[in-house]
Image: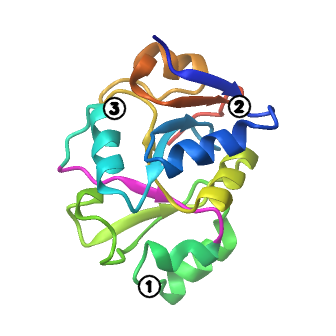
Amino acid sequence: MSAKIMAASQPQSLATAVEILKRGGVIAFPTDTVYGLGCRVDLPASIERLYEVKERDTAKAIAVLIGEVDQLPRVAAGLGDTAGRLAAHFWPGALTLVLPRNPQLPANLSPLPTIGVRMPDHPFALALLRAAGPLATTSANLSGLPSPVTARDVLDQLQERVDLVIDGGACPGGV
């Protein structure tokens, strides 16, 4: 059995993705770089599943994507002046800021006292993050394999491991 796939342009795709995430699911979706895997940032079981889907070493941190700067306090313990200026200039975009993590985040998100936070410059990803809130994310590939730039790439590697794949066409690549 393969994962459910929906076009990002389908009117119900956003609501379907948000509902799956609310239930603790793991989805794949397009960003401004590559396809990402995402789950709720506040559910340890979902984060554990994200590691399992990707076959990622749990000693490696998982980054967080946000849809608006107002979501930052939910994941980071502070944004210094320099980081604030960088965020104002480069977000949304491919800049990941490494910030002190909010201590209320699940411990399995990162073994470190910091967290990588990014705001992608992609219409579907931003809409998803604004509707669902911050997501724990990583590239939608098996660890060690190339990062996917199409929904087909995701399906070729992950097949039924994810609950939903949002097909937003080709991503530009680069992580």
Q: CA distance from mark 3 to mark 1?
A: 30 Å
Q: 164 and 51: which one is in front? A: 164
The answer to whether residue 96 is seen in the rendering is no
**Residue 168 horizontal/vertical position (percent):** 71, 31
Q: 12 and 64: which one is in front? A: 12
Q: 81 and 111: which one is in front? A: 111
Q: What residue does disc 1 label?
A: 78
The answer to whether residue 17 is seen in the rendering is yes
Q: CA distance from mark 2 to mark 3?
A: 21 Å
Three-letter amino acid code of the residue under disc 3: Val
For numbered disc 2, what is the local secondary structure?
A: loop
Residue displayed at 20% across by 41% down: 57
Q: Is residue 107 above or below residue 167?
A: below
Question: Of the residues tagged 3 and 1, which is closer to the observer?
Answer: 3
**Residue 174 horizontal/vertical position (percent):** 54, 38
Q: What residue does disc 3 label?
A: 53
Can you say which quadrant of the picture contains the N terminus? top left
Tally the marks.
Answer: 3
Three-letter amino acid code of the residue under disc 1: Gly
Crowding at dot 3, Cα within 10 Å, few <14 / some 14-19 / many 20+, comes out as some
Crowding at dot 2, Cα within 10 Å, few <14 / some 14-19 / many 20+, comes out as many
- Range of residues picked out in magenta: 59-68
Residue 21 is left or right of residue 69, and the answer is: left
Residue displayed at 30% across by 58% down: 109
Q: Which mark is residue 168?
A: 2
For numbered disc 1, what is the local secondary structure?
A: loop
